[in-house]
Amino acid sequence: MLLPAADAAAAAAAGVHRLLSLHPIRRISSLKVPWRRDAALDAAILRDRRYRLATRLVREVLLSPGRRLLLRYLAKRRHRIRLPVLVPTFLRRYPTLLTLSPPPNPVASPSPHLLSFLDLASRLHDLHSPLLASKLAKLLMISSTRALPVAKIAAAKRDFGLPDDFLTSLVPRYSHLFRLVGDPGPDASGNAFLELVSWDDRLAKSVIELRADKEADVVGIRPRPNFTVKLPRGFYLKKEMREWVRDWLELPYVSPYADTSGLQPGSPEAEKRLIGVLHEVLSLSVERRMAVPIIGKFCEEFRLSNAFSNAFTRHPGIFYVSLKGGIKTAVLREAYDENGELVDKDPMIELKERFVAIMDEGHRGYLEELRKKREELEKQRMQEANKGGKVGAGIEDEMEEEDIDGSGEDEDSEERETL
């Protein structure tokens, strides 16, 4: 059962009074916690750089008529997708992604490996459609209007593992949960909304509440739902902030699915609700992390303030904000181990792992071919040296081209990775 706002406020009154007595004049917005870099979580994001670049490039072809695109047109889109190397160079390094037809006007199209991947994606989306439908329903249930603009859902669909055609493949299949209002247009950018048809109490439980229920099944006593706080090694909060966090954690948990319209903005219980919403949204994402601007698109519907992103740094034991990849990314700490490896895996993560495996397979072949070329170049150098001549310019030029890494155009100016 959902806890009404009035009852939630009454239950929290004692804790709130204690908290305010300790800090009678400090507003939550004034609480400052220094941001500290987490190298392991930054590395997790940097490891995805090649994957992000490849998916952008592949998407340009898949969205083209007939899934075919002239290479010269694809090359012109290089800067738009922020590819730091020439498109032909990238395709040589990852030959299992796209197939190029012969000159003089090569056309890029999905490779057999990619077509197999797309078939797997279709089967996985179908297999896990109940999970995807529940995610979508939960997002609508968090919304104060029980509805979301289709354009905003489309902007975040990959974060939640939704298929590109979720409006036609998923929504009609669960008509008891969803209703489409308006015309979304061919690219889901129209003035359309997705509405929740019926409320499901079974779905109106957050990850934190479900975790408490699971523990109750094991030990027979249900613990109080609360956040897992996991400060990184060597990170210390000042005494005043430690005391604030301690007392704040003692406040009753506020479900992101509860009606909390009566909460006073800036109050400790409103902060509890805010962190609950952010925690739940990240928990619904495939990788338990999302770009902060994408979350920001839902500010109005989720009743988040314009300064909601400050909450991530106010609670460094719950979240981490990475600045890598040219964008702020909010990470759920409890989902990752100390090495930055994702341990709380969503079933849809299999798609990413399979795509990366296809990339790696092609890249290994490319490196082997490159090794043979280097050996051939060295052999020619030795032969020419014995003859007192120079190595042919053709093969040297080819090797130099293969060594381009585009570091001058890397999207991350702090740490660059050779593709």
Image (tube, rainbow, N blue to C red):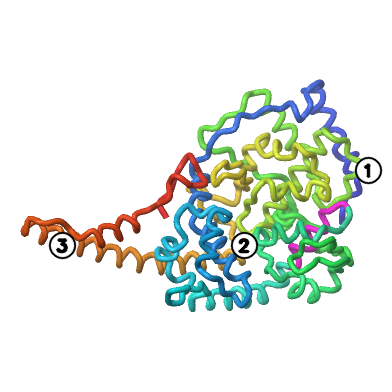
Residue 314, relative to residue 23: is it above or below? below
| Label 3 residue SS | helix
Mark 3 vs mark 2, CA separation in Å: 51 Å
Magenta includes 140? yes
Mark 3 in CB contact with mark 2 (< 8 angstroms): no
> Residue at horizontal 57%, vertical 44%?
326
In the image, 232: left or right of 222?
Answer: left
Of labels 3 and 2, the one closer to you = 3
Magenta-colored span: 133-144
Amino acid type at circle 2 is Asp
Q: Quadrant of the N terminus?
A: bottom right
| Label 2 residue SS | loop
In the image, 395: left or right of 233?
Answer: left
Residue holding disc 3 = 380
> Residue at horizontal 68%, vertical 34%?
314
Residue holding disc 1 = 6
Of labels 1 and 3, the one closer to you = 3
Residue holding disc 2 = 346
Residue 352, relative to residue 272: is it above or below? below
Magenta includes 309? no
How far across and down, in percent of the image, does residue 197 sit? Answer: 89, 67
Q: Quadrant of the C terminus?
A: bottom left
Mark 1 vs mark 2, CA separation in Å: 35 Å
From the viewer's side, name the closer residue of 160 and 76.
Answer: 76
For residue 61, the mark is none
Mark 1 vs mark 3, CA separation in Å: 82 Å
From the viewer's side, name the closer residue of 222 and 18.
Answer: 18
Amino acid type at circle 3 is Gln
Q: Quadrant of residue 373?
A: bottom left
